[in-house]
Image (cartoon, rainbow, N blue to C red):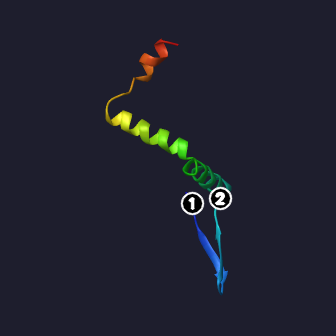
Amino acid sequence: MTIVKEIGMHETSYVIISKDEYDSMQATIEVLSDNDLLKQINKSKEDIKKGKVRKWEDFAKEL
């Protein structure tokens, strides 16, 4: 659970979050900054909608 606490006076404010939350936000920013990765994610979502998927069990049998 993330608790955000705003501390500050005047025009300056601070937000305190956990290191895990910060790391998660950084990872999200990294993904959202990668246009090629975003294109692949969107293509994968379309493939799922079209039923172009395989069950893991079927795939694993081929390994």
Which image quadrant is residue 15 in?
Answer: bottom right
Distance between the alpha carbons at the discs numbered 1 and 2: 7 Å
| CB-based contact (under 8 Å), mark 1 and mark 2 | yes
User: Quick one: which residue is furthest to the top in this view?
Assistant: 62
Which residue has dot 1 on it? 2
Q: Position of residue 18 (x, y in %)?
A: 65, 58
Q: Position of residue 21 (x, y in %)?
A: 61, 55
At x 50% / y 45%, what residue is drawn? 38
Q: Position of residue 44 (x, y in %)?
A: 43, 36
At x 64% / y 57%, what residue is drawn? 22
Which residue has dot 2 on it? 18
Quadrant the N terminus occupies? bottom right
Name the amino acid, label 2.
Answer: Ser
Is 40 in front, or is 25?
40
At x 42% / y 17%, what residue is drawn? 58
SS state under label 2: loop
Q: Is residue 1 left or right of residue 11?
A: left
Q: Is residue 50 left or right of residue 19?
A: left
Identify the mark nearer the N-term, 1 or 2: 1
Badge 1, how many Cα within 10 Å: few under 14, some, many 20+?
few
